[in-house]
Image (tube, grey):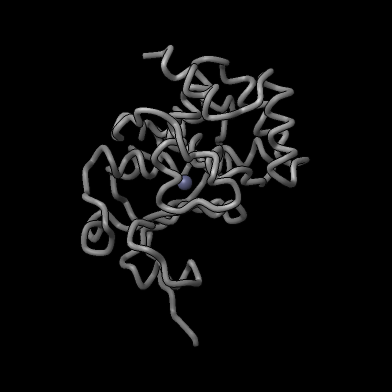
Amino acid sequence: MIYKLSLAKSNDKFIKKIFQESMKDLGEFYGINWTTNTPKIILLEDRKSIDLLHVKKTESWLVGWADNNMRIVFILDKKNFEKFSSHKYSTAGYSALIKHELSHLFYKILSEGKFGPAWLSEGVAIYTSGQNKLKTKPREFKNFMSFYAKGGSEVYKESGFAVELLVKKFGKNKLFELIKSLQSISNENQFNKTFKKIYGFQISYKVMNKFYKNTE
Ligand SMILES: [Zn+2]
């Protein structure tokens, strides 16, 4: 099949503002001053375009992603957001979504292209984009670690709060150390060992929930 793609430059001031603010905030969080060859944002018109570029039929919750090689954030255009997705549109939600995808690109600079456990990668993107503030806080952690190799719609529920807890309790440096270690980690067992070396404890729901309760 052959397709013809035509891209026009957008001067959307709203997106431009989100982009600039996100790059500044994320740059401060990650300690990366990204000023040249900055990411591009491509707004997609409809579900058909998402499926075509994703090279598969996507689920209705998928509204954006970040391509690390091309350093492009693909996102469903806000004007068609509710028409072609299962999400409600809100200014805050859409801004955080763009920031979330940009955060994935910063993360990949630290990880040298590795995604790592899905819960870690998504959790960092959720936490740094401020999406936790738009989510219902889980009462306790019970499934985030089951999303290691694969994500899916459920990974977004607890992972952002798990990462927030790790940052608030142990600081950013340990998190960055963990992300930088991902390049030499090839399975969950190795990840758990590295985690323990950096944080000083074996990650489990029991320990995480104990820390979580103490922050309330
Ligand atoms: Zn994500």
**Position of residue 7 measured from the top left corner of the image (x, y, whole percent):** 41, 66
Q: Give the camera-side residue of 141 and 20.
A: 141
Q: Relative to 56, is 64 above or below?
A: above
**Position of residue 104 measured from the top left corner of the image (x, y, whole percent):** 52, 42
Task: Give the number of callouts.
Answer: 0
Q: Quadrant of residue 4?
A: bottom left
Q: Give the camera-side residue of 123 and 149.
A: 149
| Left or right of 83 in this view: 119 | right
Q: Quadrant of residue 95?
A: top left
Q: Quadrant of residue 188?
A: top right
Residue at the outermost bottom position: 1
Quarter of the image where the C terminus is located: top left
| Left or right of 4 in this view: 89 | left
Q: Relative to 132, is 167 above or below?
A: above
| Left or right of 110 in this view: 135 | left
The residue lying at 31 percent from left, 51 percent from top is 11
Residue at the outermost right position: 184
The residue lying at 47 percent from left, 68 percent from top is 53
The residue lying at 70 percent from left, 22 percent from top is 198
The residue lying at 30 percent from left, 35 percent from top is 135
**Position of residue 8 measured from the top left corner of the image (x, y, whole percent):** 37, 64
